[in-house]
Image (cartoon, rainbow, N blue to C red):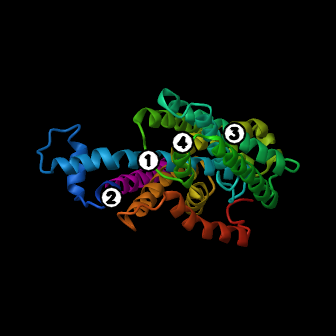
């Protein structure tokens, strides 16, 4: 098991590194991948300079912050999707589909509305997002749960209801926000990767690390829960405790990610689903693999979004929705039963 995990992580880490170099190299101004790697390496190694100052500015100032944000947001959304899918034993569970992303967006909008959208208050927006996400997740679970089970139909309907409610609440809050802040809110809700400062990214990374630790520590209990709550309890797991931890951790990482990216849908559905198909249902593999695969997926998707119609940039949330909607429709149509009992 350990050898397989190390092998999977090594392959995904190499893939993520390649995706990052590609994202830093391509754009309106193309830069060779050798120059890109040298620019990055020059910060830690005494390398001869064979690139221009303009190329260094493009890589380090314009592209690197966005790529780092894509890595963090992709990891967080994919991790949350893996957690929600495992706890619900449902391949359609995803932060966006369940309305958790809408709850997080509402929390962020309320943070801006109450005056935390500027200055040092920006650092608190990930926590506002996490609070909104947790409220949404608990509400969906409360509505959809039937005798401890989460049927697909009720889960999806509960997600639609919660998402519509928070979307309406966002509209009301947006109508009351000052005009100069409204434009930023509109672009935020579309789903775009624009890093304003590194301290904010640090807060999001902190939330991601905490959430990752909490979720991975529950990997074995989640494996036991796949056999049913009664069987898991007989084997020593505590189903209700595991559910609470997973819901809190997934809400934390979703809220933190949405606070800096807006609504980027279906990452948490497609990536963990693909990982389960490739690696099987063992959450000790699925959780860390989803983390890296989600980062790689969003880096590549964002690269496509900003280059396919250059110099015009397509919101990355639109691209992930275009890719994810057919996958969601397929899963819904086939009532997927391949991985989950």
Crowding at label 2, few (<14), some or many (≥20) Cα neighbours within 10 Å? Answer: some
Q: Nearer the viewer, residue 19 or 224?
A: 19
Q: Secondary structure at mark 3?
A: helix
Q: Residue furthest top?
A: 120
Image quarter for residue 212? top right
**Chain part drawn in magenta:** 1-22
Q: What residue sits right under mark 4 in the picture? A: 181
Q: Secondary structure at mark 4?
A: helix
| Image spot of residue 286 (x, y percent) | 57, 52
Residue at left offset 34%, top offset 47%: 64
Q: Does the magenta segment cover residue 10?
A: yes
Q: Secondary structure at mark 1?
A: loop
Mark found first going from the N terminus, 4 or 2: 2
| Image spot of residue 114 (x, y percent) | 62, 31
Q: Give the alpha-carbon distance from disc 1 to disc 4, as whole Å.
A: 16 Å
What label does residue 56 carry, if any? none
Residue at left offset 48%, top offset 27%: 120
Mark found first going from the N terminus, 1 or 4: 4
Q: Main secondary structure of the magenta part?
A: helix
Q: What residue sits right under mark 2 in the picture? A: 22
What label does residue 194 carry, if any? 1
């Amino acid at each position: 098991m350990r050898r397989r995990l190390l092998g999977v992580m090594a392959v995904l880490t190499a893939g993520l590194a390649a995706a990052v170099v590609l994202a830093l190299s391509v754009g309106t101004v193309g830069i060779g991948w050798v120059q890109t790697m040298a620019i990055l390496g020059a910060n830690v190694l005494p390398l001869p300079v064979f690139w221009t100052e303009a190329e260094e500015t493009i890589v380090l100032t314009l592209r690197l912050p966005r790529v780092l944000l894509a890595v963090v947001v992709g990891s967080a959304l994919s991790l949350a999707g893996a957690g929600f899918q495992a706890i619900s034993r449902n391949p359609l569970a995803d932060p966006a589909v369940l309305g958790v992303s809408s709850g997080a967006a509402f929390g962020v909008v309320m943070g801006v509305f109450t005056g935390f959208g500027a200055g040092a208050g920006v650092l608190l927006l990930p926590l506002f997002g996490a609070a909104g996400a947790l409220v949404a997740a608990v509400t969906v679970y409360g509505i959809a749960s039937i005798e401890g089970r989460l049927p697909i139909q009720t889960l999806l309907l509960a997600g639609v209801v919660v998402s519509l409610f928070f979307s309406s609440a966002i509209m009301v809050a947006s109508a009351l926000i000052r005009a100069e802040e409204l434009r930023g809110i509109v672009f935020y809700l579309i789903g775009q990767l624009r890093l304003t400062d590194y301290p904010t990214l640090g807060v999001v990374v902190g939330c991601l690390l905490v959430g990752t630790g909490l979720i991975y520590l529950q990997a074995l209990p989640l494996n036991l829960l796949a056999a049913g709550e009664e069987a898991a309890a007989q084997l020593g797991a505590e189903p209700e405790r595991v559910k609470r931890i997973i819901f809190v951790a997934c809400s934390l990482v979703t809220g933190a990610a949405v606070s800096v990216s807006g609504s980027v849908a279906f990452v948490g559905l497609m990536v963990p689903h693909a990982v389960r198909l490739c690696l099987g249902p063992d959450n000790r593999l699925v959780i860390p693999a989803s983390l890296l695969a989600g980062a790689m997926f969003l880096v590549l998707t964002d690269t496509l979004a900003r280059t396919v119609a250059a110099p015009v940039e397509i919101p990355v949330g639109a691209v992930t929705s275009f890719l994810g909607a057919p996958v969601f429709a397929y899963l819904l149509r086939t009532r997927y039963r391949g991985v989950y009992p």
